Image: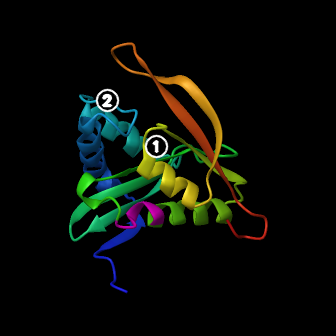
Amino acid sequence: MTRPSWTIRPVGERDIDAVVALLAEIAREGTYIATEWPFDLAARARALRDALLLRRSVGWIAVDGRELVGELSVIDVTQEEPEIGMIVGALHRSRGIGRALLERALAWARTNGKPALTLRVFPDNERALALYRGTGFIDLSLQPDGIVRRDGTGRDVLVMRHAIGESGRT
């Protein structure tokens, strides 16, 4: 088995600008995430930096060489069942990065006594759905028009949940 060229590590303050740049890249695709392009890069960086420094969120990044290629955040660590959000760059999908990021988040949830993690995904994002279901997330509910776009149209959102087993297994 070939060892991946990328590594996973905790996100730090020094990574925020690269995370926002990756978010902008994926937002420009206009397909997979709720964030729409354009958005204020500096304001988003400030918000992410504040959440990280105030310990309201935790996260991990995937780095290939010197390039940030993926990121997963636990959005509000104070919640009983926190929501996660994940992005992986277009050229780096289907390489196991998403699965590795999810494994880190699930390990964090076990260590921190969280009963579950949740996420929201567009129901037409088949690749993400396959990954989430393959790692133990189950469908909870479909929210019709759960994400309202700037143009006023709505997109359905599927809410998923991954229970963290009491035995320490997910």
Q: Is residue 153 above or below residue 24?
A: above
The residue that label 2 is drawn on is: 36
Going 26% across and 52% down the picture, which residue do you hit? 90
Residue 73 image offset from top left, x and y in percent: 47, 50
Q: Which mark is residue 51?
A: 1
Residue 32 image offset from top left, x and y in percent: 37, 40
Q: Nearer the viewer, residue 44 or 72?
A: 72
- Residue 53 visible to an observer of this rendering: no
Q: Secondary structure at mark 2?
A: loop
Residue 118 image offset from top left, x and y in percent: 61, 46
- Label 1 and label 2: CA atoms lie apart by 20 Å
**Where does the C terminus fall, quadrant-wise?**
bottom right
Q: Nearer the viewer, residue 121 or 11?
A: 121
User: Which of the two discs, 1 and 2, labels the residue nearer the N terminus?
Assistant: 2
Residue kind at label 2, given as amino acid type = Glu
Residue kind at label 1, given as amino acid type = Ala
